[in-house]
Amino acid sequence: MSITRPEARVRPYAAALATSALLLSVSLTACTGDPAADSQPPEGETADVVPRMREVLHQRARALRKHKWRAFLATVDRTEQRFVDRERVYFANLTQLPLGTLSYRVDGSSLVRTAGGYDAVIQVHLQLDGYDALPVVRPARFHFTHDPEGDGLLVASDRDRSWEQRNDVDVQPWDSGAVTVVTGGGVLGIFDTLSAGRAHDVIHAVEEGIGQVGQVVPYGWEGHVVVYALSDTDLLEGLDDLPSQDPDALDAVSFPVPARIDDEAGDPLAGTRFLLHPRMLDSDPQQLGRLIRHELAHVALGSHDDDVPTWLGEGIAEWVSVQPMPEDQRLISQATIDAAAAGLDELPADLDYNDADQAAHYGISWWACEAIVDMYGAPMLWRLLDELAATSQEDQDDVLQQTLQMGSGQLAREAAKRILATYG
């Protein structure tokens, strides 16, 4: 495991915390010019300005890839010290990442002349080497000013928070605050100053989990994953399509990373990552390991569980998560036992899976998978997953019946019987 830190002169956040309170107040956000003063530049001016934007952005990307602070600083408008401080943090962040691709593309049609320079939408292409199958492309609104020492341009802002909110742009932790990047065998961990103290435990648990999950899940997963373990829930709250309306109710979540935010269903993904809730960083090591294996199972399954009933996708992830554990240490919620004792007639439905009874739903789903393995063997679990993934939603009940020779109700009763026999 290695903790990647930028060169000392860049003042990484952890070091700056001890020497200056300034970076604590630096949000990686900057404002652009007065919208009332914005105007579309003449066509000839656009043809002149866009190449100069491309030039300074090319220099910026090259400096970041080569870890050259002075070259990076040469692309920055240093009029506002606050923005320079923000850029120090941004440089420190990106130079910790394993950058396979980093480039900036100017959207010429978005160019706007302001009182202080120019605004434009820039498509940022960033691919994490060894972790992303494709570059992740995200738009950002930059502000450029004239270089007083030449005829070029300088970057005076690389974020516009209100524009990001209006355009539903998801912002990565390295874009919004100081991060510490910690790597292990197949793991890229993203921490912040307050969570970095738990990096060793988290990375070790993920490393172990990768090997354990890889031995169980039969699909071709490379065993590489990006995990976020931050001290706040900002990223969690900003994710789309969360399984719960209350982000704070989630201990962890895995999520797909589309190559572009306007990708349609079926387009290739850059990858799947997962995020731990801050409270889980101080949890019992066995509980943390089980939770990490659950999320790694989702990562390893990739798109295989996208279109199956939630009970099967979550049930498999729970089943995988407990496989390395002794049977007498595989804890289950009291809500699951109570539901089994009350009698089960159906498996949890997708629509209300993450409602107030979600603890019971996860346990029931897990034991439905245990019942399948008990009756037919583990290969049947994967066969069922493949069969349902290839079936339209309206036909999945019939395929379940044909594959297992039992319906949802009977499988729920088989799960309940085993829960009560195991936990009393």
Image (tube, rainbow, N blue to C red):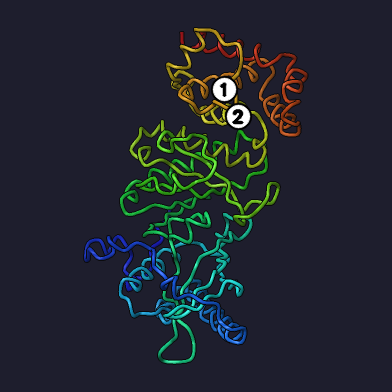
Label 2 close to label 1 by CB (< 8 Å): yes
Task: Look at discs 2 and 1 and give the one toward the viewer.
Answer: 2
SS class of the residue under badge 2? helix
Q: Is residue 121 above or below residue 333?
A: below
The circle drawn on residue 310 is 2
Residue 235 vertical position relative to residue 86 in the rendered view, above or below: above
| Residue where numbered disc 1 is placed | 365
419 or 286: nearer the viewer: 419
Q: Position of residue 35 (x, y in %)?
A: 44, 70
Q: CA distance from mark 2 to mark 1?
A: 9 Å
Q: Residues within 10 Å of mark 1 (few under 14, many from 20)?
A: many
| Badge 1 amino acid | Ser
Q: Residue at x 52, y 13 (%)?
A: 419
Label 2 is placed on what type of residue?
Thr
Q: Which mark is residue 81?
A: none
Instruction: Identify the element where label 1 is drawn.
Output: helix
